[in-house]
Amino acid sequence: MPRGSISQSPGKGKKIAVFPYDVQQEADGRIVTKKVEIVVYMQSKYGDSDTAPRPVVATMFQLECEGEKEYGSDLDLCLKAMLAKLDARFAIKWERWFLVKVDPARLYGRGVGAGCTLSWQDVWRGVTLDGSVLMREIEVRREFSSPWRISAWPEVYRDNNGKTVACVQATDANEAALEAFAEKLRDLTKTLSKFVAPENIETTLREISEGGLKLLGSK
């Protein structure tokens, strides 16, 4: 081998190709596309020789795109691996949120009265390649095979009755606070049940009629 000769290509090697690729997302019944380019470099390893050019004994490919890299000796496999990385990277990342509401309790059977229920349900928030914000919900009454219903993320969320509903991120702290809120309502229910116990009901009704029982407020 001549003195001072190199055994392989310097740096990344030679830029040999650029492959355009359309990363696609299906969002809210439409396709969102981001155009990217996959740049391919080839690095060669040379064998010993007393004459030029020296023989190439091995090649290695390096692919780069959007900060992702892939290396290998089989270009086709490297391309497949890079495409899988890009599809995973640009897939919509869904974040869990809670829809929180307090509704009047439903009374079944005979009787009249009042009460309330605190409830929260999971929804998911995602941002598309073009910046659109989406909401993903579990489809209770499924018309198609997909369990999801996807729509635009509302500035103000409203239920089927048009009532405004709070929506908060599903952090551990928020979930713990909702559980604590629910526990306080359970405790309140136990307290209220004592007011209508047989030995207390008449006193309770009299105090309410006279503007007492501040626990329930007064007019």
Image: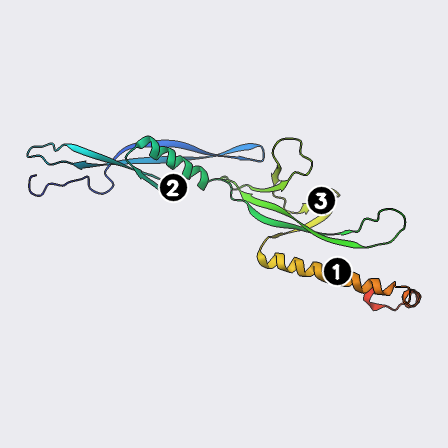
**Which residue is depicted at the point 58% across and 55% down?**
171
Label 1's element? helix
Query: Element type at marker 2?
Result: loop
Q: Earlier in the sequence, mark 2 or mark 1?
A: 2
Q: CA distance from mark 1 to mark 3?
A: 25 Å
Q: Earlier in the sequence, mark 2 or mark 3?
A: 2
Residue located 60% across and 49% down the image: 97
Residue 209 is left or right of residue 189, and the answer is: right
Mark 3: amino acid: Asp
- The color scheme shown is rainbow
Amino acid on which the number 1 mark rests in the picture: Arg
In the foreground, 194 or 2: 194
Residue 89 in view, yes or no: yes
Residues 134 and 109: in front is 109
Residue indicated by mark 3: 159
Disc 2: CA contacts within 10 A as few (<14), some (14-19) or many (>=20): few
The nearer-to-camera label among 2 and 1 is: 1
Confirm or deny contact between disc 2 and disc 3 (CB under 8 A): no
Q: Single out the mark in the foreground, 1 or 3.
A: 1
Mark 1, residue position: 186
Q: Label 2, on which residue?
A: 66
